[in-house]
Image (spheres, rainbow, N blue to C red):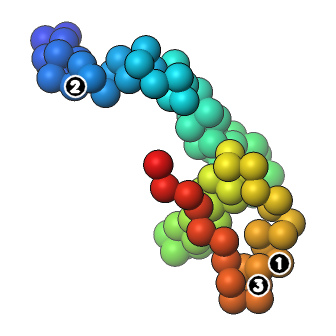
């Protein structure tokens, strides 16, 4: 495992160190980890037994991911939801 990690870091050196040359790239991925942590901890405490189906879990993850992306891009979430229900959802900006 250690050798595989070192080899991957060596192979993907430019991507791993991108935060050094591009100040828009965060040093860590804590924000992405926090996005995943919420459903795992808080939701599990509120909903006994989790989701009733895989489709329900996937739909929840899709909506949550979309709203999280909109929030990170400083889009007004209320306005994004209004437009979505009007059939004109704002699309996230691609990097």
Q: Does any portion of residue 57 appear in the rendered image?
A: no
Give the CA separation, mark 2 to mark 1.
41 Å
Q: Position of residue 22 (x, y in %)?
A: 46, 25
The quadrant in which residue 52 appears is bottom right
Tell me, yes or no, whether the two marked residues, 3 and 2, touch with CB atoms within 8 Å.
no
What x and y, as percent, mark residue 91? 59, 68
Task: Give the residue number, with chain letter if any, for mark 2.
Answer: 12
Give the quarter of the figure containing the N terminus: top left
For residue 15, the mark is none
Asked if residue 18 can be seen in this view, the reply is yes
In front here: 47 or 35? 35
Q: Where is residue 63 in the image (x, y as percent from the top left)?
A: 64, 66
Q: Do the residues labelled 1 and 3 touch (CB within 8 Å)?
A: yes
Could you say which quadrant of the image residue 24 lies in?
Answer: top right
Q: What mark, if any, has residue 85 been given in the picture?
A: 3
Q: Callout 3 environment at 10 Å: few (<14), some (14 to 19), or many (20+)? A: few
Q: Is mark 1 on a helix, strand or loop?
A: helix
Looking at the image, residue 33 sits to the left or right of residue 95; the answer is right
Q: Is mark 2 on a helix, strand or loop?
A: loop
Q: Is residue 67 above or below residue 41?
A: below
Q: Residue at x 49, y 55 (%)?
A: 94
Measure the alpha-carbon separation of dots 3 and 2: 41 Å
Q: Are marks 2 and 1 in contact (CB under 8 Å)?
A: no
């Amino acid at each position: 495992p250690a050798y595989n990690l070192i080899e991957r870091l060596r192979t993907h050196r430019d991507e791993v160190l991108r935060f050094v040359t591009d100040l828009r790239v965060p040093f860590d991925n804590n924000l992405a980890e926090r996005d995943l942590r919420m459903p795992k901890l808080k939701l599990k405490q509120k909903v006994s037994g989790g989701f009733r189906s895989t489709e329900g879990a996937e739909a929840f993850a899709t909506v949550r991911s979309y709203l999280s992306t909109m929030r990170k891009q400083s889009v007004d979430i209320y306005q994004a939801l209004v437009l979505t229900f009007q059939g004109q959802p704002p699309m996230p900006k691609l990097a």
